[in-house]
Structure formats: structure tokens, C-alpha cells
Image: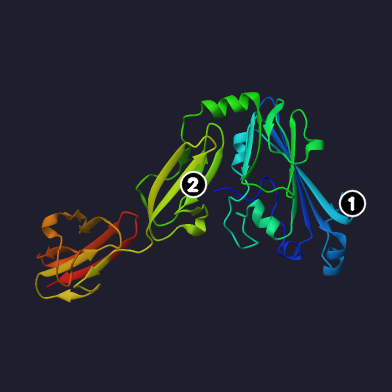
Amino acid sequence: MKKFLCACALVSVAFLSTGCMRVYETLTVNDDDTLTATVKQAMLKSTSDALNSEKDPNTVEEVLEDGNTYYTQTETKAYPSTAEFSKDSTANISKDIFYINLDNGNSTDSTSADQSIIDLVNQSIYIKMTINLASDIVDTNANIKEETTGKTAVFDTTFLSQSWYAYTAHGKELIEADVTAPVVSNIENGAHYSKLPDISVSDDTAIASQTLNGQTYSPLNVKDGLNTLVVTDIKGNTTTITFYKDTTAPVIKKIKDGRTYKKKVLFYVKDKLELDQVTVDGKKMKLTKKNFVKSGKYKNYYKFEIKKKGKHKIIAIDKAGNKIKYTIRIR
């Protein structure tokens, strides 16, 4: 759903494995709702030299606050709106509200784009985040007090809690007044999918958590069959979406594709989850209790019959769009 950290580019596997990375991110929201994100990535010079790492021409050699020398690269990106920034970010930010759930990833793969801040800290990566809102901040759990003043709140990973947050007075009012549940887009409640769509979520204030089947949200946690997605905002308003993943086509029994039969044929159709339609020569067959088999060898199958001589095309499709086609002939 969202990418790791905020606007930060994914660092290489070699850098992650050495535990010698530092990441500095500054987010500045303007009165017109535009946003600027600046990210500095730093790798310990001694480690880079030992690895004989090829350095980008934009790399700068710097001594950082821990007294060590690093190779650093800095990138700044301007966004036309905070909403546009949110598409690339695990952070929720507007002119008046900043909120980030520190453990919103569930990935053990260091090449994944879904890593949380805690994932990265566990790999010994230091992160410092500076937030500049449009008005003075009145409530925050920013831990770098000497740099937190006025519109600015500063956090680093020497302090880890469930979340980092900073609110202006207007932001606090919005949170208190929020009675609207988050909006989940690009997925329908109760729908069947053969491929998971690109789910997006939004809220009037900020998203606090997203869980899938009781675990932190990750596409990796989608299972075959029924899935439950729960999205909660920082006020506690919740939206729950259930959907089905189905990548298996329906099954046709009693007949074989390409065969010729001497007389009328019976065939049976079943799907792993739910059939949508069965057609014979383009005509929809009825999926009713009358032709649903309740016992015996073909229990839970639908039973159909073809009497007419000639070539017949049978198509069965399930609710997720998985399809199976048979062609038979009756002499």
C-alpha cells in the first residue's frame, strides 16, 4: 500500500547488512499544502572503502554528529500536495498533523519497499526525522527537545514508541472532531480477486494502523480464501473490508476436454470458492438448488446435461474471473 519510510530511497543490501547507515529526512509543509522532502543517506566511509563500493559522483564526504566520517548523498523532492506525498509514504502529514506508526511494516526482506522504521533500526540503521508544519506545534512526543520549537519537531531512533506525532492547535481540534472512518479505495467489500489490487487508504486526520488477517498489513499476508483488512485512524474510527483471494479456476468433472461422446452427457462443475457462471455454447446455465449436488461423489458440484448432437463449448468462470474452457462433441 505504501512505501518504506517516507520519500527515502531504498538503500542497497550491502549497506543494510553492515549496519553502518544513517538516514536524515526533513519534511516541510507549506501554507498552500505543498510539501518538500529532503533525504540524506550516509554510509560509513571506512565500511564503504573496505567494500570497494563504487561511489556516485554526487557523493560528499562528511563528518556527522557521531564524529565518524561518512559518504553522503542528499536528494530533495517537491510534492504538489501532502496527498500526493502520502502515496509514497508510510507517514501521515498535513499542514496541521504529523503521525507515523513506527512498526507498520512486516517484512524480513531487506530489499522490500515495505520496511518499517523498526525493521530498519533492527538492522542498526540510525534515522533522524525533522517535521516542519505550517503553524506552531502544540502537542508532540518529539524526543530531540533542543531542536523542537515553534513549527518544528525532531525525532530520532534513540526513541522508539508506537508512533511519532506532532499536532498544531487546529490539528488537535480536527482529531477531536473526527467521527469519520477511513476510506479504503480500489477494493470492494466481499469481492473476489485473482490478483490483489493496489489498495489505497485515506482519512480526514491520519491513519494509525492497517492490519490484514490480524497482522500488520503487507501484501505478503494475503491468503487464499477470505481476508479481513482493518484500517483505524488516530481517533479510533475503523473501517473493515473483507475480500477473497482466488487464483484457482473451476473444475469440470465426468467429461474430458476434446472428447467425442455417443449420446447425451452429464457433467459437473465446482469452484474452490464460488462459481459466477457456466455457459454452454454461449447460453448461461442456471446455478440453482435443483442442480446442486448435496451428496455422493460429486457433492457440492453443480450438475448439467447436454443432449443435442454436435460440437459444444463449455465455459465455467468463478467470482474472481478464473476460467476453464472445454470443447466436446456429441455424435
Residue at figure coordinates x 89%, y 51% from the top left: 62
Tell me: residue 321, above or below residue 205: below
Residue at figure coordinates x 15%, y 60% from the top left: 292
Q: Secondary structure at mark 1?
A: strand
Q: Within 10 Å of the Cα at label 2, are there few (<14), some (14-19), or many (20+) other Cα atoms?
A: few
Taking 230 as reference, is 2 left or right?
right
Q: Within 10 Å of the Cα at label 1, are there few (<14), some (14-19), or many (20+) other Cα atoms?
A: some
Type of residue at label 1?
Glu
Front residue (pair 292, 108) = 108
Tell me: residue 309, above or below residue 65: below
Q: Which residue is mark 1?
A: 62
Q: What's the mark number on residue 199?
A: 2
Residue 68 at what x, y percent from top left?
89, 56
The C terminus sits in image quarter:
bottom left
Q: CA distance from mark 2 to mark 1?
A: 40 Å
Q: Secondary structure at mark 2?
A: loop
Residue 155 at what x, y percent from top left?
73, 42
Residue 112's quadrant in the figure? bottom right
Residue at figure coordinates x 65%, y 62% from the top left: 110
